[in-house]
Image: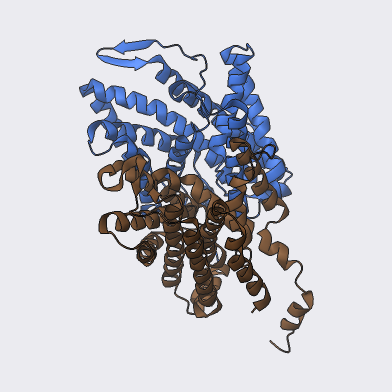
Amino acid sequence: MKLVPIGVVVAVLVALPFLISGYHQGLATYVAIYFIAILGLNILTGYTGQISIGHGAFMAIGGYTTVLLSADQHWNLLATLPASLGISFVCGLIVGVPALRLSGVYLALATFALAVSVPQFPLKFSKFLGGSNGIHAAQTKSHLWLYVVGWSCSALAFAAAWLLLRGRIGRAFRAVRDSELAAVSSGVSLPIYKTLAFGVSAAFAGVAGSLLVLVTNGYAQPGEFGVLLSLEILIGAAVAGLGSLWGVIVGAVFIGLLPSVAPDVPLIGSAHGQDVVFGLIVVLIMLLLPNGFAGFLRRFEPRVKTTIKSDPKTS
Amino acid sequence: MLGLAKRKTAVSTGLSVPVLLLLLAGAIFLVIGSLSSSIFAQQTVAGLAQGAIFGSLALALVLIYRATEVINFAQGELAMATTYIAYQLTLWGVSYWLAFFLTLVIAFALGVVIQVVVIRPVQHSVIAVVIITVGLFILIDGLVTWKWGADLKFMPAPFGNAVYHAGSVAFSRQDLGTLIVTIFSVILLWLLFQFTKLGLAMRAAALRPAAASLVGVRVNRMLALGWGLAAVLGAVSGLMTEPTQFLQPTMMQAILLYAFAAAVLGGLESPAGAVIGGLFIGVFLNLIGQYIGFATPELRLPMAFAVLLLVLLVKPNGLFGRRQVRRV
């Protein structure tokens, strides 16, 4: 276990709110939100090999759960987070069942369908879900509160993902990813582990969605959860590198901070130039670092270790 | 001899009798409905015109899918960008139809360049290609908005605004023109694939890349050509969309999604299936919007995707797809 890098990251995160303004704390919270969502997608795509372009939909489900519970039932905002975790988990399981029959490009299209369809429902059922203006949570919170809650959730999510992936379930996930046939022959149940991966991944996205709603002054609107959000999370996961937990922070920083780079930087500063840069970087990263940031880091790992491990006498 | 014939059917598209009967029944239903109600007829023709646009974009997706088994998520944005190029040409004083054909040439070049520069290096990995096309989606969107702005732009109407009357039914010249241009371009493409040596080489490269390269087909060149032709079809669909939606950077996004549904309905591998799927989605959405009160415009996208999901779950190979058998 890499204790030193964890210690450094935690120290920076604890010190950060004392050093930066409220506005920048808000930005840092966005990074935390993307961190959780990308982590979730990485469990599904990177570890289980199922692609999803629909995680914005699960974020929408989480976000609307939080706002509805707060506005209609007057729940404490913190208490809504486990609720949205649970509801997104169940929704993920439900989506995971039909997804069992799909793979590759077909699964990408089906989940894309989900990302496009879900934001249409608040428009259709506007009495209950507020239409295009959205609905508003009962309270709004300070930047500092959001920062602390956002990064605490991130830490919990990271720990949960690490514990999940290092054990039996993680091994089963990776077995499914590498070869479904081999996994089945070794007694790994495909239906159970594939739907489980969808559920866990959706639960992460749901919590990220709840936090996203809170950080946008407590408003849940269909526009927040459009197709672009799903695409951004996929891109974040690609930048991070699939199948690695360590790259996720880089992917989250990339997605979270690029849109807020100072407006006086040429090209990036203007609203549309930003998309140009965003798209260019995505294409370049896929061409130059096909395994994302994690793959980049892996290049510097000492090769000796791996040769000792694969020595036929010891294995 | 028998073995040879068997192999042939395994490669050809899976046109089955029940599917043909179903299509025939659908066509008869539309004809009878149109004869008995003028609103029905009007909605059907408008639906067919829209469906032809979905179909040509779906065909672009299918061309690329057949060759490399990936979906080009940037296909719609590419179509939108080429429509803006046509707009720029008309601004410079080029007449509409000259601009139309110049744009097709430019679109072809653009498609080829994209394949060679960014797709070819990663074409072995489906996830990488998907993410690159998603990146292109955002990049093209940004470039167009940056250059031309997000507000509505208008081009000269290609077919004029005349309306024809047949009995009590009104057909706009626009709808008929769209239908004719898209169907015509699809037929041209079919002729290219079916009756020219180039088309044969492209089909060979898509079906059996290794075997094709052994008999001297330059597979990579054929794949690039495929991307070029897909971009041309996309440009046709973009140019035909413009008169009804006007020019704005988001104009092809919903249409791309309908095209996805159409392509999956047709089986993702079948060109004819993509076109018929497009026509079906267009007519289906129009009729259901007309006659079912619950199906308000907000539900158009979810309904198209309900079709997509249903097809994927019930008949994953679509109406015309080949059954895929994989050896392990």
Q: Residue at x 62, y 40 (%)?
A: A274
In the rendered view of the protein, which quadrant contains the N terminus of chain A? Answer: bottom right
Q: Residue at x 68, y 60 (%)?
A: A293
* Image x and y of residue B316, in percent: 42, 53
Q: Residue at x 24, y 27 (%)?
A: B32
The shade of chain A is brown
* Image x and y of residue A109, in percent: 47, 49
Image position of B148 (left or right of B112): left
* Image x and y of residue B119, in percent: 67, 46
Let me know if residue B187 appears in the view: no
* Image x and y of residue B209, in percent: 66, 49
| Front-lying residue, B314 or A173 | A173
In the rendered view of the protein, which quadrant contains the C terminus of chain A? Answer: bottom right
| Front-lying residue, B170 or A248 | A248
Let me know if residue B63 appears in the view: yes
Image position of A232 (left or right of B28): right
Q: Quadrant of residue A9?
A: bottom right
Q: Which chain is blue?
A: B
The image shows a total of numbered marks equal to 0
Say how the picture is coloured. by chain
Q: Quadrant of residue A303?
A: bottom right
Image position of B315 (left or right of A37): left
Q: For the view shown, which residue lies furthest in the bottom direction? A: A313
Q: Quadrant of residue B88?
A: top right
Q: For the view shown, which residue lies furthest in the left direction? A: B36
| Front-lying residue, B192 or A209 | A209
